[in-house]
Every structure is written in C-alpha cells, then in structure tokens.
Amino acid sequence: MAAAEFDIPEIKDEIEIPKLREGVMAHAKSFIAGKPVQDFMGYPHELGEDWKERAIDKMGDLLGKYRSLKVFLDACVHCGACTDKCHYYLGTSDPKNMPVARQDLMRQVYRRYFTTAGKLFPKLVGAKDLTKEILDDWYSYYHQCSECRRCSVFCPYGIDTAEITMAGREILNHVGMGQKYSNEILGKVQKIGNNLGLPGPALEDTLEGLAEDIEADTGVPVKLPLDVKGAEVLLVTPSADFFSEPHVESLIGYAKVFHAAGINWTLSSHASEAGNFGLFNGNYETMRKVAMRIRDAALELGVKRIVVGECGHAWRVAYSFWNTLTGIGYGGNDPFSIELQKQLDPTYPQPQHICELTNDLIKSGKIKVDPSLNDDLVVTYHDSCNVARASRMGTEPGGQFTIPRELIKSVVNNFHNMADDTIYESTFCCGGGGGLLTDDLMEVRVKGALPRVTALNNVVKEHQVNFMATICAICKAQFTKVLPKYGFDMSMVGGVHQLVSKAIKLD
Amino acid sequence: MIYAGMFYIAAFLLVAGLVYKIFDYSRTPAPLKIPTTPAPTTQTGVVYRMAKEVVLFESLFKSNKWIWVFGWLFHFGLFLVLARHLRYFTQPVWFWVDIVQPFGKYASLMMVAGLAGLLARRFVVDRVRYISTPSDYLMLVLLIAIGLSGMMMTFVAHTDIISLKEFFMGLMYFDVQPLPQDPILMVHLALVATLMVIFPISKLLHAPGLFFSPTRNQADNPREHRHVAAWAARLDQNN
C-alpha cells in the first residue's frame, strides 16, 4: 500500500501557529504488527472479544506502577499553555496533535473508569466510555507523538505527554494493536543484537571494510575492533552508524578519536545497538531486557568504561535509565550493581557520551584538531530532543547544550545557532523520533519537521549555513529523507563526529 | 442548621479526599528518572525549582504570557483573599492577618480580573475552546461567582461579620451558632462549600499534583545515584 499523497507545507519566515483543522490527520496510521512480531513480544495480534476489559485492566495496572501517569492524568487544568508547542500540531494543524488533546484521548477514558467525577457526571468533565473509535484515535495519534517532551517544558505542572503516549502504546499492545515498525525492531534487537538485524559476521566484515577505507583515505591504520576482551572502552552506538549515510561518517570519527588518543576500545556484536525502542512503547521490562545486553557485554568483555555514540533516545536510556535498569552507573549498593561497579573505572562517568569524551580529549590537548579543515562549512547545531530534555552531559545542568557546541566550535570555524526558541530546551524534534521513523508515517514526519526546517531555513538565508550537525541517528535518518522534500540537499545533515573526523590530526 | 451540617460535610470531604489523593500519589512509585532537563542535580536545587514553579509559575511564564498574567493574578489574588479570611477563624486575629486585610480586600479585584481573563480565553482562542469541557467553564464561573458575591459584601452591602465569625468559631469548637440570614452571604458560602467538595475529585488536584510531578520534583543525578522502585527491584533478583 503506497502512502497517501500529501502537500509539502510551505516554509514561512516565522513558525506560525495554525488555525485548527479537525480530523485532517486521522487517516495517518502506521502498519499494525502481525502475528509473528506480536507473538515474540508476548502480545496478542488482534482484538479479542474482551479487548475493552484488557485495556482498562492494563490502564489500571500502569496507574498503579507509574506516578507520572496518575498525576499527569489528574493535574491538567486545560489552561492551553501546551497547545502551540508540539511540532506535529504546528505542522499539521490537527487539534488532536495539541499535547493536551493528545492526553485527553486517554484522560477521557481515565475519568470515566477511574474517577468519581467521571463516573457520576461524564458529560460535565468530558469523560467517555472506551469505544473502538477511541481506540483507533489512540492508535493514530499516539503514533503522531515523538515523545520529545517539548510540551513538558512549558506545562505549569510538568505534564509530559510522552508518558501518556508510552502508556497508550503499551495498552494498545496489550489489546493486540502493536505498531509493526517498533515491534519488529524490538524483535530484531533481542534476537540478533541490533535494530537493523545485522548479524555478527556481517558486522565484522563491515568494520574491516571501513578500516580499509580509512587507511586508504588517511594512510593511518585506524581500527574498528569487535568483541575484544579486556579492552578499556566498550563503545555502544546505534546500528545505523555501521552502514547508513551520513551516520557512518561519525563512526569513522569515533574510531579516529580513540586511535589518536591511544585508547584501547571495542564494539560488541552482542550489544551492537545503543538504541532501545523499549522506551517508546513504555514497557519497563522490555526496555530492561534490551538494556541488559549492554551490561552482559560489558561484563563479558571486562571493559572499564562504557561510552555511547551519537543517538538521542539511546542517550536518554543510557544516561537516565541504565543505572536503574542494569546497574551501569554508581551509587547502587546491592550485589547486582556492585558486580559491575567493581569492574568499571570510577574516574570516569558511567556511561559517558562520546561528545563528553572527545571534548575532554581536545580540551586537555590529548588529541589535536585543525578546524580550518572544515572551512568549507557553515555549521548550525540541532539539539536532539532526548538529549536536550531528558539527559545531561558533563557535571552542570545544561551541559547537554554546551558540550556539543564547544566540541563543534573546536573543530569548525563557522558556527551559528538557530533561533533561541527552537534550540536548547525549546528545541524542535526532527519529526521522526519516538518510533515514527517509518515510511508509512511519511506525511506525519514531513509535516512534523516544519518548525525545525523553518528555523534552519532562516540561518541558511541569514548566515549561509550549509551543514546542520546533530548527535542522533534518528535525526540524521529523518532529515536525510525529509530535507530534500523542502528543497534542501540531504548531505547538509551529519553527525558532530563527522566534523571531528575531518578536523582531527592522526599523526 | 443546614449550613453548619453543610460545612462539616464539605470540610470532611475536602480533607478526606485530599488526604486520600496525597496518600495515593505518594504510594505510587516513580520507577524511572524523568526530570525535564536541564534540571537541578541536588535536592536543594529541586526545592528551588519547585518554589519558582509554585510562586512564579516559571514554566507557564516561558510558555504563554497571557495565561501567565491571568493565572498569576487569579492565584495570588486568591491567596491574599484567603489570608484575609483567616480573621473569621482566629481569635485573637493573628497580627499578620491584620496587616494583610487591606491588601486582601483589593486582591479580590485581581482575582476576579484574572478569572475573567482565563474565561475569555476559553471563548476567544480556538485552541483553548477546542479543549474546554463544560466543567472547565463552570469551574471558572463558580470561582467568579464566589469572588463577586464576596466583593458584594466587602464593597456594596456589608454583612454582619461579627455573627459570621461567631458562626465559624462555633463550627470550629463544635458549638453551632446561627448564621446571619443574609442572602448574598448564603450564596457565597454555598458556592464555597461546593468548591470544597469538588476540589479532591476535579482538576483542582493540580495543586497537590504539582508537588508529585516527577518531571519537576526529581533531581538530575541518575549516573551518581541508583534509583529503583520496589516493583522494579524484584527484577534484579532474577538475574
């Protein structure tokens, strides 16, 4: 089935808040996961007769496990502060893409089944019985949210729609409406070791080929080691880095950094994926299972440091959740945590972001760079949503903004930020995050990218920017596909370590 | 006396409802670290962040200046008005409640102006109109009616506040006294009792909810401190 035709939005001078157009995106539905995919995940693949009870039971279960969900469903006062904050609303003008309206799709059901007011006076408080129409709305609109948390910055109570979207997807999975794209990936990462389904031998070939390319290009034998026991650093990076363009350029960059700094490092075939789509579906156990691969690989290889490559949601899971899920980090005094802690080198943060590592090496003079090698570029930086609003780098709040910029400015001479209300904590999602990076959601992706593209267009016009750096595999894949629809060259997107790769001195 | 019974019931429902909700929020675990970053890295920092949210509505200020102005006028008007009302419940009246009297009197204007602005937005802004339920309008109307009936007694037709105070002090010491039979006062009090009853079962839960919001009340220190919920910790033991 070909995706429906749609018009590419026009880029205006400013990001405009559109008038509501009800229902214009109701047709956008990604493919539903089939039997084999759902079987592997332990979910049904079609609605059973008891789907309604299952959905309400699951909602009750999640309400008991997640304070966020319970508080967020209660606390909203419909003030409207978030209504113009979502890139999908700005790009589509469908009111159900306003964060509060997206939340209300679940809140109306929550009120009906779980609150006194909704049981007694449903009409008054907007409470509704769960119906198939509502379930279809959930499927459609919970897959038009990239869980980017922009709304949570602006909500006076910190309500994070991502938490509600995750719960919505989890309930959908439990009634048999899983999303094909995300659940297939969750199967592949657990069965094969990475989201792309690239088996160990193929990965080994790819890495050897890359090493040959680098040597042919630079004359320096930079290696990309795999499964080396006793290496100091385990690098965990999104599998897109292994062969997608422009991702691979950053992988080459990491390899050059390790080489130049003389750090003994390795990749792992068992943990050949930093990404963790368990995050997107709001299932703690799945997210934990996927994250445990990293712990297992670290223990098996006996590494002292764990470093994460350029991937936004992966860094959220690594920075914010790995310690919780797998004991990668400090402070745990249980046997499970201690087993790993006694192996890791306490002089480094665990896990560490590759930008933290490279920036430290450049600042301390351990590696040398020549920014003039990037003089053909005028660079801007796209803060990836999960890095910006759900993680940190360095020791100070906001390090996730300053460290990548410091690093970029040390390897390029021409840098310009996009408009303030589109970067840092107010950054706009690329439009493809949170499990939406699939061709069956192309319309949502293209329209959702409009705010970012508008801001980019302004620095292109003003400062002749010709390169947008980012540290997320999904952002890179999304922009490579979507920017050409707006008339930009796809090669103007790339990783921060792609810039490092060009500027680093290897001799 | 109907009003005495009404206030006992309303006060009981308000307190019991809120205690239950706060208990329910606090017993529900937050299994993952999800502060909206940049976030403070220490608990002291979290207290500071939360104070800015509670007092200044910092996030709302970032978001939308109109909602912020109206919302802040309303809440701080209400705060001063409530402080002024403490004189009906304290004997002798606390000294700062005395000081706040003139401010509380005119704060009612702030409060009603803010509420009117918020109500107007529900009609005027298409996005806000779309998300508004009947209860959203009624809640504002209820609060405006409480404000206006109160202002009537302050600025237009004074009520017998000596007897009123005897009524409330009587309620507090379980010695029920008659309520002055002033229709405006009776409307005012009936509306207030209604508000007390719906508080714990409505969106007014945003007040306690803010303090339990994990995106605002968590410190950003997941690499340094292992954070595990009880139900999640059991998973570690199966490895």
Image (cartoon, rainbow, N blue to C red):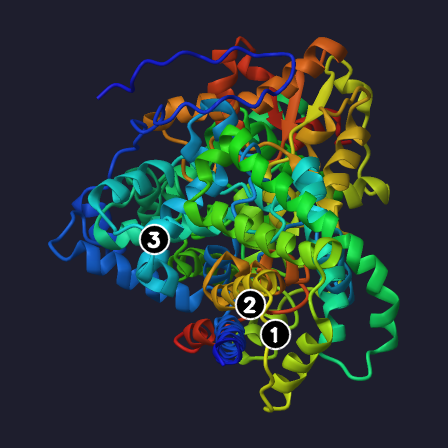
- Quadrant of the rendered structure where residue B235 is? bottom left
The residue lying toward the viewer, choosing from A239 and A219, is A239
- State the residue position of label 1: A332
**Amino acid type, residue under disc 1 in the picture:** Gly
* Labels 1 and 2 touching (C-beta < 8 A): yes
Q: Numbered disc 2: what chain?
A: A
The crowding category of the residue bearing disc 3, from other C-alpha atoms within 10 Å (few below 14, some 14 to 19, many at least 20), is many
**Amino acid type, residue under disc 3 in the picture:** Glu
Q: Residue at x 64, y 54 (%)?
A: B147
The residue lying toward the viewer, choosing from B91 and A352, is B91
Task: Report how far apart the C-alphas of labels 3 and 1 lie in the structure.
Answer: 29 Å
- State the residue position of label 3: A170
**Residue A479 position in % (x across, y down):** 52, 23
**Residue B183 position in % (x across, y down):** 56, 63
Going from the N terminus, do you reach mark 3 or mark 1 first? Answer: 3
Going from the N terminus, do you reach mark 2 or mark 3 first? Answer: 3
**Residue B229 position in % (x across, y down):** 50, 72
- State the residue position of label 2: A327
The residue lying toward the viewer, choosing from A322 and B128, is B128
Please determine whether, in this image, residue B13 is positioned above or below residue A405: below
